[in-house]
Image (cartoon, grey):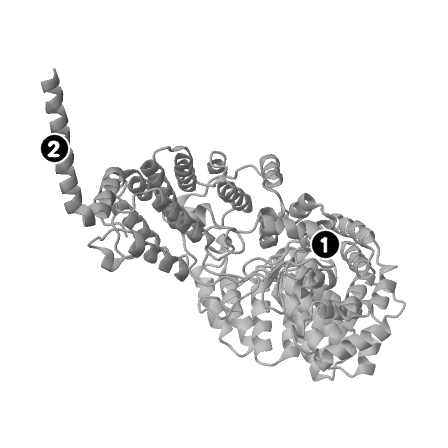
Amino acid sequence: MFTRNWPRHLLCLSLSLPLGSALACGPDFPMRLLDNRGQSLAELPEGNFAFEISRLGQAIAGLKNVTAATHNPDYSYGDTPDYADQRSAAEQAGLTPEQQALVQQLRSLTDANQVVEQGSNLPAEYRFYLAGAVAFNAGNRELAADYFQKVLALPMDQRPLRSTWAAYSLGRALFALSSEAGADPDLLTQARKAFEQTRQLSIDGFSDPLELGVASLGEEARVVRTAGDWNRAIELYAAQNLHGSAVGYSSLKLLMADLAAMPEDQLAELLKGKPVQQLVTASLISRLGWSFGDEPENQKKLVKTLQNTTRGSLENADRLAAMNYQQGDYASAKAFLEHAGDGGLAWWLRAKLAVREGDKSAAAAAYAKAAQAFPQSEAWGERRTPDFDYEALAPKCRVEGESAILALQRGDYLQAFDQLYRSQGVYWFDAATVAERVLTLEELKQYVDTQVPAPPVLSQQDRDNYVPLPVAASLRNLLGRRLLREGHYEQAPAYFDNPGLQNKARLYGQQRQTADSAWWPTRRAAALFNAAWTAREWGMDILGYEMAPDYATLGGNFSLGSTELKVGPLVTEDEVKRQQASAAQPEERYHYRFVATALASRAADNLPHTSQAFAAVLCEASGWNSSLADQRALYQRYVKEGPYVEWAANFGHQCPYPDFENADKRYVTQVTDAARSALRPYKTPLLLGGVGLIAAVLLISHRRRKAR
C-alpha cells in the first residue's frame, strides 16, 4: 500500500467516489442460448402449467375476481387469518355491539330451534342463517338445508346480507346429503343449482364478503365430478382459476394426479372429452409430474394414451404438436401443425422443424412469424435447465433469441444483437457476448447512439437497496469500457451510467493521454504509473469485460468459464475471427490487472534504475496479483537493476509512493556514478598521469612566455 506522498488528485477523487456494491450471495446463473446453439434450436422448453390452464375454461360474466381476502392464502405464517376468522369478522360486520354478542352466543348453541327462539331480536335472514349453520355443524344436514331455504324464500329486500351465504351453504348441505345417500342424482342436481344460484346472487349485487361466488365454482366442480362429469369439473375449476382463486389451480393439479393414476382403458375413454384432453396436454408439455431424469411410468402412460386417442384430432392442435415434438415424434408434430393455425407456438414449432430439415430460410421466416404472433406480455414463468441454470421464459424473447442464432450464422450481426438485446435481462449474457466480442466497436457505438438513450441515473437509495441497473445502462457501460480498452479516451466517459464511473474513466483517459504526449521521461513515467494504479484499483468498473474473462456483469465475483469458439454448423469463420480480434489481452481473468502491471513496467522503463521511484513502482506493481510469474519477474528486476531501499524487506506489501520529482536528479548522478565506478581500478595511474599532464601544460606555457 502507499505509505506516504499519496498524489493529491488521486486521494481527492477516491474519497469523492461512491462505494461499489457487492453481491451479498451467489446468484442464480441465467441460461445462455449461445453456449450450445444446436441444443437451443432443437429443444422446446417445457411450458408452464399455470399459464397453460389459464387457456382453459371461461370466466363468468359479471362475477368479480377474488381479492386479497381469499387469494392464495398462506397458512405457513401465523398472522394469516383462517377461514373461520374471516367468516366471524364478516358475520359481525354491520351489527350493533348487542347484536354481535348475541350472534356469538347463538353460534355456540347446538340446537337450531333454540337459535330461532333466542335470536328473535335479529333480522330474519340472520336468524334463519344462524339456525342452519348450527344445524349443519351438529350434523343435521337436512334441517340445515331447510333453514337455508327459508333465508332464500324471504323477499329480496329482507335478505341482502345472507343470500349468498345461504345459497352456498345450501349447496354444501345438499352435497353432504347426496353422499350419505350414495351419490343420489337428484340431490347432486339440487346442489349444483344451489351453487349456480350463489354465483348469480353475487353477480346481482347481494353481499358476498367471503367471495362465495367464486368459491361456488370449486364446490360445483366437486359435485359434477362425483356425478362422473370430468369435463365439466375441469371447466369449473379452470373458471375458478381464471377468477384468481388458488383453489382452482391446486384442484386441477390434483385432478391430473388422479388421471395419471387411472387405468389406461378408463383414461382413454375420458380423453375423448376436449377439456380432459386439454388438461392432460397442458400437464405433459409443462412436465408437471417431473423435471429431469427418466420419465416416470405414469407420464409415459399419459403420453401413449393421449397419442393414441388424438390421432386425427383437430382440437388443441398446436399443444398436441408441442407434446409430440417434446417426445421426439416429429412426424406427428408436423401432422398436427397442418391444423394448428397461426399461433405463436405453432410457428415456433414450424421453425424448429425447418431447422431440423436444414431449411434455414424457412426457419428464419417461421421464427419471424412466431415473434409477431406471441404477445409481448406472455410469460411462462421461470424454469430450470438440466444444467440447473434458470430461464425466465417469455416465448417472444426466446423465439427472437433462437432467431438470433441463425442471424449470427448468416452474418447479420447487428440483427442478432438487436434480437437478443430486446429480451432485456432475459438473455443479457448472450447480448453482451455479441456486443463486446462479435460487433465491431463502430457497429456497437452506432447502435447505442441511435437506439439506446441514457436512462435516469439510479439514486443512492436504489443502489443501497440493490435495485438492478437498467439493461440500457449496462449496455452503455459495456461500450464505455470497450472504448477505454481500445484507446478512445475522450469518448468513453459519457457512456458510463453515473458521475463516479465517469470520473474514473476520465481520470484514466487523461493519464493515458499524458503518458502518450509527455516528452520528459519522469513525467511520462508518473502518468503511466498513475494510469496503472487506476487500472488496478478500478479496472473492473472501467476496463473489465462484461462477460469472459472478467465477468463484470457479476461484479467479477464469479466466473462462468469459457470454451474456445470453433467453426461449426452454426458458427462461421468470420464470427470466430471477430471474437478472436476482440479477445482480452491477455485473455486471463481480471485481465485489467495484467494491463496495470504492464503499464507499471513501462513506467519503470522510463525511470533511472538507481532512483527510489524505480524501486517503488516495481514494489507496488508486484502486489497487484496479476500472476505469480509477473510478481517474480518484477521482484527479480528490482534485485537485478534497482537500488537498495530500506523497505525492500516488505517488497510488494508496503511500498511508498514513487518520488518522481527527485528521480530527475538521477539522470546526472547515474552517469557520473557509473563513470567513477568504471575508473576506480585505475585511480593511481590516472592521478599520476593527471599530474604529468598538468606539469607539461605549465612547462609549455612557461616557454611561450620566455619566447616573447
Please state the horizontal and vertical placement of residue 393, each as a whole percent of the image.
64, 58
Does dot 1 land on a helix, a strand or a loop? loop
The residue at 69%/77% (across/down) is 257
In this picture, residue 267 sits left or right of residue 171: right
Residue contact at pointers 2 and 1, CB within 8 angstroms: no
Residue 124 image offset from top left, x and y in percent: 58, 64
| Residue denoted by label 1 | 61
Secondary structure found at label 2: helix
Task: Give the alpha-carbon distance from disc 2 to disc 1, as whole Å.
Answer: 127 Å
The foreground one among 94 and 153 is 94
> Looking at this view, is 312 or 89 the one in front?
312
Evaluate whether residue 5 shows in this view. Answer: no
**Tag 1: residue type?**
Ala
Q: In the image, what residue occupies the spot 40% across and 46% down?
A: 599
Where residue 545 appears, as percent x and y from the top left, is 51, 51
**Residue at the extreme right:** 312
Q: Name which residue lies at 52% across and 51% down.
A: 584
Q: What amino acid does circle 2 point to?
A: Ala
Can residue 307 be seen here? The reply is yes
Horizontal side of residue 512 vs 546, given as left or right: left
Check disc 1: other Cα within 10 Å, few if <14, some if 14-19, many if 20+. Answer: few
Say left or right for 374 vs 689.
Answer: right
Label ID, residue 695: 2
Q: Nearer the viewer, mark 2 or mark 1?
A: 2
